[in-house]
Amino acid sequence: MSAAIPSVACLGVIGRNNNPLHISIFPSYDPTANAFTPVRNPLQFSLLLSSTIDVFDLRSKNSTASGDFGLLHAIDDRLAAYGFETNTGVRMVCIVDMRGRRVEAGGSAGAGGAGGPSQSSASASSSSAAAAARASMIHVGAGLRDAELKPVFRAMQSAYVGLLQNPFYDPDEHAPLGGKGGRRITSKKFGDDMKRIGEGWTPGVTAL
């Protein structure tokens, strides 16, 4: 017997000029096909990320402090967008699929990636993943709390800080003074960090 619990469907980074910097998409479990597939295509996810900008702007007007914005909006009965803003105006978005991960009754979880995580990473974290999965099944019926996403945004911010420390990364190329255009983040390490975060998160996980 299996149950469906939340998983990360998409991670996005939006520049301070509201320009897209990065997007990572993660497959969700499809019970009808017994396979993992994204619930939206890249263009649809890009539009969903863009739709959060107005929410960020509205929240920013009502608060001078940057930081965790929590739930930005529920997209539908399955997807919800959560947000975080750095003190430099870079916005990070996590779109959660409330039924994206399959958990067996014994507590083992199957999740995104092309067919799921690699065997080496799965075996290294099997016990913690099982414990998190069991915890998820206990309280997921009550809804997802904003605090559940804090480890995701801490890890995303840490990855972004690491990117800024790269001497070959020029932030101005990605946030032009004119406010239009700008390059996207192409760092493989940053992309790998986003992949690790998206695949590693499940409700109950406290560090990524």
Image (cartoon, rainbow, N blue to C red):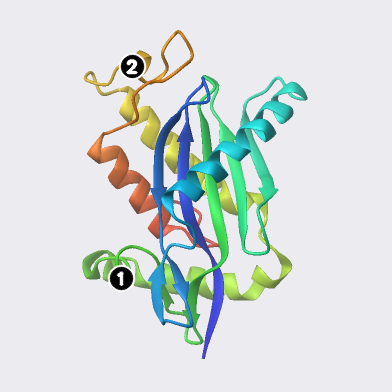
Badge 2 is on which residue? Answer: 173
Does residue 208 appear anywhere in the picture? no
Residue at x-position 78% and y-position 25%:
62
- What's under tag 2, amino acid-wise? Glu
Q: Position of residue 194 (x, y in %)?
A: 37, 46
Query: What residue does disc 1 label?
Result: 115
Q: Residue at x 61, y 48 (%)?
A: 81
Q: Is residue 201 above or below residue 164?
A: below
Q: Residue at x 22, y 67 (%)?
A: 120
Left or right of residue 133: residue 116: left
Instruction: Give the secondary structure at mark 1.
Output: loop
Instruction: Work out whether 39 lies above or below 146.
Output: below
Which residue is more in the foreground, 75 or 83? 75
Count the labels in the image.
2
Q: Is residue 83 above or below residue 59?
A: below
Q: Quadrant of residue 160?
A: top left
Q: Position of residue 71 (x, y in %)?
A: 67, 46
Residue drawn at x 47%, y 86% as measured from the top left: 106
Horizontal and vertical percent for residue 128?
42, 67
- Up the image or down, 153 lies above or below 25; here it is above
Report x, y in % for residue 133.
50, 72
Foreground residue among 5 and 48: 48
Tell me where residue 139 sits by quadrant: bottom right
134 sits to left or right of 196: right
